[in-house]
Amino acid sequence: MSSRHSWQPGRSSTVPPPRSDGFFELPGSTANRFDPRWASGRRRPPPVPPAASPPAPPIKKFIAVGIDFGTTFSGVAWAYSRDPDRIHEVQQWPCLGLQEREKDEVQVPTQIDLETQTWGFKIPPNANPIRWFKLLLLQDRDLKPELLNSPCLQDARKQVARLGSDAVIDLIADFLSYLWEHTCREIALEMGADNVEALPFRVALTIPAIWPQYSRTMMKEAARRAKILKGRDIGETSLTLVEEPEAAALATLFERMPYPDVKVREALADQDPSGFDETDKRSRVKLSSYVIAEAALSTLSATRSSRRSLSS
C-alpha cells in the first residue's frame, strides 16, 4: 500500500530516500545532518565555553576641587584621587603690600574693585569694591526684604547697572577667574606643573539650596566664562553644583567616618555665619538641621571602600 510520503523507484518526489539507519538526509547538504549517535548519548557536541567577563575598568586618576563661592567670603580646597584623605586648603592668598605678598587665610573676601582691577585681599583700603554681587543672580522677588534693602546690595546693584545688562555674570566670572588661576598655581606648586597637566579636574561649586533654576544656570555660565571648563589635552573638566547644606552635612559625616556612632535618624546641625547685616548692625547665623537616613550610611560605607581602593 503506497502513500504520498513513500518513495518508489522512478517516481519523482521531493522526499529523499531513507538511509540504512532509517533517517532521511536533505539533498546536497551535510552541514545540518542529524547524527543519531548524539541522541543515544555516545557523542555530544562540545560545550560552549562561557564568555569571558570584561576586565575591571582602571581607576581613574583626577584632581578634585571644591569651590565655596560665598556672599562675603570664599574658599577653595582640593585633593588628589589617589590620596583622598589628604585635603589641601588654599590659604596663601595674594594681598596688598609694597611687594606682592601672600596672606595665610582659609578664605578670601568675595569682593572685586573695577577701578583698580583688584580682588580679595589685594584691594586698596581707600577703594570702593563691589561686595555681595553673588546675590545679584537672584531676582528681587526671590530676595528677603532685609537683603533687598541692604546698603551693600544696593551699592553693588548701582555699580553693576553701569556695566550693562549681562554684567552680573561677567563680574562673577572675573572673580571666579582670579580664584581659579590662583588655585591652579597652588596645586602646581604642590604636585608639579607636569603632573597637573596629566590629570583632569573635577570641580564642585557650592550654591544655596533655595536658589531657583535660573540662578543655577547663570552660575554655570559664569564658571564657563571664568575658563574653569576650558579644554585641556588630558580631557574635559567636569562641573557639579553642590547645595551648601549638602556640602556641609557631607563634610561633617566624613569627619566622623572613623567613629562608629553615626546612626540612622541622628540629627546634625549646620551653622552657617551669613555675614554682617548692615541693616541692623548685627551678625546673623543661619542654622539648619538634617537627619541621617539609611542612604547616607550606605554612602559612607561606599565612600570608605572607594577611598581604600583609590589609595591602594
Image: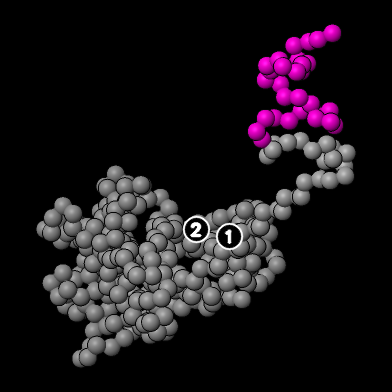
Locate residue 89 relative to residue 101 in the image: left or right. right
Give the structural element (helix, strand or loop) at label 2. helix
Which quarter of the figure has residue 308? Answer: bottom right
Q: Which badge, 2 or 1, is on the more N-terminal residue?
A: 2
- From this viewpoint, is residue 252 visible? no
Left or right of 74? Residue 160 is: left
Left/right placement of residue 30 relative to residue 190 reads right
Q: Main secondary structure of the magenta part?
A: loop
Of helix, strand and loop, which one carries label 1? strand
- Percent x, y of residue 175: 26, 68
Span colored in magenta: 1-29
Residue 74: image quadrant is bottom left
Q: Is residue 25 magenta?
A: yes
Q: Quadrant of the N terminus?
A: top right
**Amino acid beneath label 2:** Glu
Q: In the image shown, does 302 or 128 lie closer to the viewer?
A: 302
Q: Is residue 162 above or below residue 97?
A: above
Q: Counting other residues with Cα less than 10 Å from the Cα at mark 2, is it few (<14), some (14-19), or many (20 or more)?
A: some
Query: Which residue occupies the foreground of this view, 45 or 253?
Result: 45
Q: Nearer the viewer, residue 13 or 255?
A: 13
x and y, in percent, of residue 94 in the image: 29, 82
Q: Which residue is mark 1?
A: 268
Residue 246 - label: 2
The answer to whether marks 2 and 1 mark residues whose Cβ atoms lie closer than 8 Å is no
